[in-house]
Amino acid sequence: MKAVFLLIFAALLFAAPVNDQAASSGEAWLKLIDNGKYADSWKEASAYFRSLVPQKTWVSMVQGVRAPLGSLVSRSQPSVTFAKTLPGAPDGNYALMQFQTSFQKKSSAVETLTVMADGDQWRAAGYFIR
């Protein structure tokens, strides 16, 4: 029983830094989007993301979605869920983050950002707004 408790405790100690790293990487990436630095957001995304979406396509897509919303008003702390597999993506280490977000021209939105372990960093692998 004591060994099981120690294993659970150790897992919790290691999970907190991973959770913090994934969340802070994701939030830093979203700031690029918030500031209209769409090309930079593509450069800072995971290699997997960049292999799927050419930079010009990404810039055009995200500009078309974000510009009409206006500037960021608020974004909640993310709820973070970890996964090893996602539909249509290679197996890996993923963190799915959901934010309750308010924009100047859309008061209530849900942003979903997926980050993945890409080398020794967490980098964006997918982004959706609804």
Image (tube, rainbow, N blue to C red):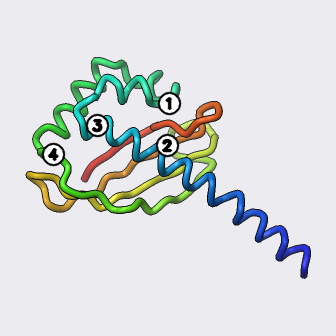
Give the mark toward the camera: 2 or 4: 4
Give the mark toward the camera: 3 or 1: 3
To which residue does mark 4 refer? 71
Q: Is residue 117 left or right of residue 77?
A: right
Identify residue type, mark 1.
Ser
Q: Earlier in the sequence, mark 4 or mark 1?
A: 1
Residue located at (77% from left, 70% from top): 8
Tag 3–tag 2 contact (CB < 8 Å) = no
Q: Earlier in the sequence, mark 3 or mark 2?
A: 3
The percent coordinates of residue 130 (x first, y second) are 25, 53
Q: Earlier in the sequence, mark 3 or mark 1?
A: 3
To which residue does mark 1 refer? 46
Q: Earlier in the sequence, mark 3 or mark 4?
A: 3
User: As rendered, which of 125 and 85 lies closer to the eye?
Assistant: 125
Identify residue type, mark 4.
Ser
Q: Is residue 15 above or below residue 70?
A: below
Q: CA distance from mark 3 to mark 2?
A: 15 Å
Q: CA distance from mark 3 to mark 4?
A: 10 Å
The percent coordinates of residue 92 (x first, y second) are 63, 41
Q: CA distance from mark 1 to mark 2?
A: 8 Å
To which residue does mark 3 refer? 33
Instruction: Give the secondary structure at mark 1.
Output: loop
To which residue does mark 2 refer? 115
Label 3 neighbour load within 10 Å: few <14, some 14-19, many 20+ = many
Q: Quadrant of the N terminus?
A: bottom right
